[in-house]
Image (spheres, helix red, strand yellow):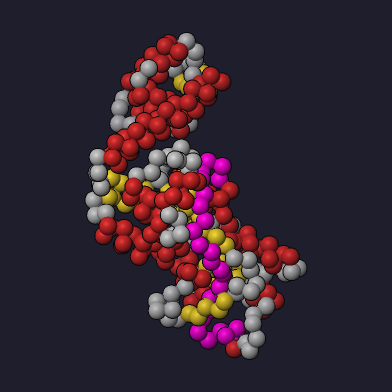
Amino acid sequence: MKLHQLRYICEVADRRLNVSDAAEAMHTSQPGVSKQIRLLESELGVPLFSRTGKRLTAVTEPGAEVIQAARRALREVENIRRIGANYRGDASGELRLATTHTQARYVLPPVIQQFRQRYPRVRLQLRQGSPEQICDMAAQGEVDLAIATEAVAASEGLVALPCYRWCHCVVVPVDHPLLNKKTRLSLEDLAAYPVITYDFTFAGRSLLSQTFEDAGLSPEVVLTALDSDVIKTYVELGLGIGLLANVAFDPERDTELRAISTSHLFPASTTWVGIRRGTYLRGYLYDFIELFAPKLKKSIIKAALNIS
């Protein structure tokens, strides 16, 4: 049994049993992948895949268990490499981060700037997506850290640590009537206007919808987006009022807009950092997390990961 055989069966499973796609992803030949899978099956004495002719059609019951064990083994091999690099004092490497547009655009820039100054030899890879996509990337080992809202805390494959809490705000053009209100905004005030807000895949969006629903209101949502800047663009065009994270409003840049707090109307949300269970963290990963959320000291993170 060889490590590359374990990698092949996992890659084939991830590529929906397309051996050619798996071979291309692993920079090898399709016949070579097929041969190594058959050699592994012969050694184990059980078929890992069902076949119709030469085509793989399904993962067998023993195959599913072997692939699951193979993924654990490959994770441990990667952990061993990370341990070696950590203890030989190698400050180079890669930090792969998946997050939402709001975090990438408004929260992370100063953190990444500080991190780069501290670790100039560490390459940063920043991937964006919806909270569900971000969690999937982390759970599959495609990234080291996931940063998003409640979806991270709900993901069974991740250890989730709370970082900070934030609220929603309403964003309007500079001449909007809501700016002239003498009293605090009400849900009825907001529901009187077309709404532009986050896509349904964002946890914060469900909080907004539920709050309106509980009040017996059904605002007209005319546009949804994954990107806070897209929301603000269409608010500037007069399509409606924007409901977004308060951290996504920058008064120095968003000069054609004004933000009004709605912290009294909607529940606060929490941003979490997610780490795949069983992952060994290099020293610079602990430092990155602490830069992002200063209360998350190394001891707290290790305790959450059950590392002594």
**Is 93 on the left-hand or right-hand side of 248?**
left
Instruction: Residue at 65%, 86% (x, y): give it.
Output: 183
Q: Is residue 116 above or below residue 36?
A: below
Instruction: Residue at 56%, 69% (x, y): give it.
Output: 168
| Residue 278 position within the rendered picture, expressed as x and y whole percent measured from the top left | 46, 37
**Is 4 on the left-hand or right-hand side of 188?**
left
**Is 124 on the left-hand or right-hand side of 183?**
left
Name the residue nearer the viewer: 24 or 245: 245
Name the residue nearer the viewer: 159 or 255: 159
Q: In this view, does 32 lie above or below 288?
A: above
| The residue stretch that appears in magenta | 155-179
Instruction: Residue at 56%, 66% (x, y): give it.
Output: 197
Q: Main structural element of the magenta stretch: helix, strand or loop?
A: strand
Is residue 166 found inside the magenta-colored segment of the image?
yes
Name the residue nearer the viewer: 267 or 127: 267
Name the residue nearer the viewer: 233 or 295: 295
Residue 141, image quadrant: top left
* Residue that sits furthest to the right in the current view: 216
Query: What is the quadrant of the N terminus in the image?
Result: top left
| Residue 290 position within the rendered picture, expressed as x and y whole percent measured from the top left | 40, 57
Query: What is the quadrant of the C terminus in the image?
Result: top left
| Residue 283 position within the rendered picture, expressed as x and y whole percent measured from the top left | 34, 47
**Is 93 on the left-hand or right-hand side of 237?**
left
Residue 234 at least partly seen:
no
Residue 7 at least partly seen:
yes
Residue 297, image quadrant: bottom left
Count of numbered marks: 0
